[in-house]
Image (cartoon, grey):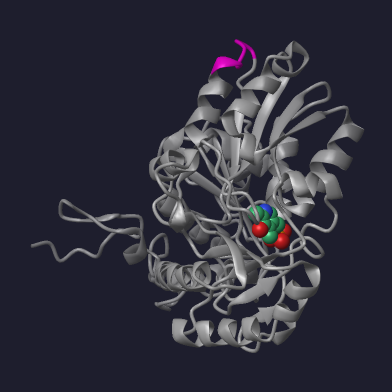
Amino acid sequence: MSMAKRDSHSRTIGDKQLHAESLMMGYGYRPELSEGAIKPPIFFTSTFVFRTAEEGKAFFELAYGLRKGNPNEEMGLIYSRLNNPDLEILEDRLTLWDEAEAAAVFESGMAAIATTILQFVSPGDVVLHTEPVYGGTDYLLKRILPRLRIRTVGVPAHQGLAGIEMRLRDREISGNLALIYVETPANPTNALVDIAGCARLAQRYSRPNRRVLVAIDNTFLGPLWQHPLRHGADLVLYSATKFIGGHSDVIAGLCLGTKELIAQVKTMRTIFGTMASPMTGWMLMRSLETLKLRMTAQMKSARIVADYLVDHPKVQRVYYLGHLTEESPQYDIYHCQCLGPGSMIAFDIVGGEAEAFRFLNGLQLFHLAVSLGGTESLAEHPATMTHSDVDPEERVEMGISESMVRLSIGVEHHEDLIADLDNALAAV
Ligand SMILES: *Cc1c(COP(=O)(O)O)cnc(C)c1O
């Protein structure tokens, strides 16, 4: 038996491959570099001292790509806009869930999305995207990218791959395609888009001098219940504000992919200055220790809540991935790319806005708030809140009615959640 300490980047004991949740407490961190502290300190520092001028020169050569590093050469610490120990440890840990080669952490989900998209598109390019997408992403795609002569083409998520293929028959679109951007499951309807199918289309429309990339916003199911890289996606994006942070107390974002792509994303991040702060990095590391516990508990309760709602006479329809049946075209996609139904539920209440509002105002344990993925359960009204900016006709087309309510299930006891829902529904 070996008595040697495990290397901070080892993922095994003997031949045994360790699970990601077992590595969240120590992976990538060497206590001996921080006075033996079991947890990484918060490295509140803007700049790092070089031991010699030669070392400083060598670090800059690598950082600016002036020379190729040796295989074992690690990038030295220079300045916290480029890199910081808390972010480096966190990024190493975040690669484990999605089995990514590399990760880049940002100060918000929008910073991750905007920085990543802008790295991979140029004037004249086309971005094909599913709809609806997160409100901030929608603004970026429809109002900011067109100002840079980047054309964006939206496809309703419920039209799926067939809808994307139809748009690609237009040569003006397929001939300039740079990026397929997908949010799946779609918010708030939980409509699924086939990730492997998108990857096949991207490959088909790639040109010798231009590879079409697929980017997936995996905020709703990841990083536990869906791993887009395994299905051929090039880039995975997260609002780490949601499940990864998980306590509604930090805003953060994440992009994952190959070393090559993430190095390009990090160049843009260095120039835009959209990296996360050391404090944000530290908070996310703390959150990661309980990620699987939280997301598993949330998913279990969500199933009980969804089953309760589907039988309630004042509920017209429930949108929940765990209720898909074999007859649904979504069923096969679900079984191919999702590992669990997650903890986001939407439902149509019998009636309209007035009934939905009466229900929301009657809740006592659920908080009436947007956002999702935290330890506390939340409820909101998409038509007048998260999706109020969407064109009303498009909103109906997407299936977001005045009677729809969205729930994010937290870690409270499921009996208490149901008691709250029951009470609020009775008041309608
Ligand atoms: C919240 C959210 C975002 C934006 O993330 P921020 O951390 O708020 O910047 C992007 N995509 C999805 C799906 C989200 O839910």
Residue in the picture at 48% in, 46% down: 74
Residue in the picture at 59% in, 26% down: 162
- Pinpoint residue 424: horizontal percent, then vertical percent: 64, 84
The number of discs equals 0
Residue 251 lies in the magenta-colored region: no
Quadrant location of the N terminus? bottom left
- Pinpoint residue 121: horizontal percent, then vertical percent: 74, 29
Quadrant location of the C terminus? bottom right
Q: Main secondary structure of the magenta part?
A: loop
Residue in the picture at 70% in, 79% down: 359
> In this rendering, would 35 be left or right of 6?
right
Of the pair 291 and 396, the residue shown nearer to us: 396
Query: What residue range appears in magenta?
Result: 204-209
39 is higher (above) or lower (below) than 142: below
Of the pair 149 and 169, the residue shown nearer to us: 169
- Pinpoint residue 252: horizontal percent, then vertical percent: 65, 62
Of the pair 209 and 153, the residue shown nearer to us: 153
Residue 207 lies in the magenta-colored region: yes
Q: Quadrant of residue 372?
A: bottom right
Q: Quadrant of residue 262?
A: top right
In the picture as drawn, the residue positioned furthest to the left comes out as 1
> In this rendering, would 60 be left or right of 89?
right
> Quadrant location of ligand 1?
bottom right
Residue 331 seen in the figure: yes
83 is higher (above) or lower (below) than 281: above
Residue in the picture at 50% in, 45% down: 102
Residue 273 seen in the figure: no
> In this rendering, would 414 be left or right of 315?
left
- Pinpoint residue 131: horizontal percent, then vertical percent: 71, 42
In the picture as drawn, the residue positioned furthest to the right comes out as 147
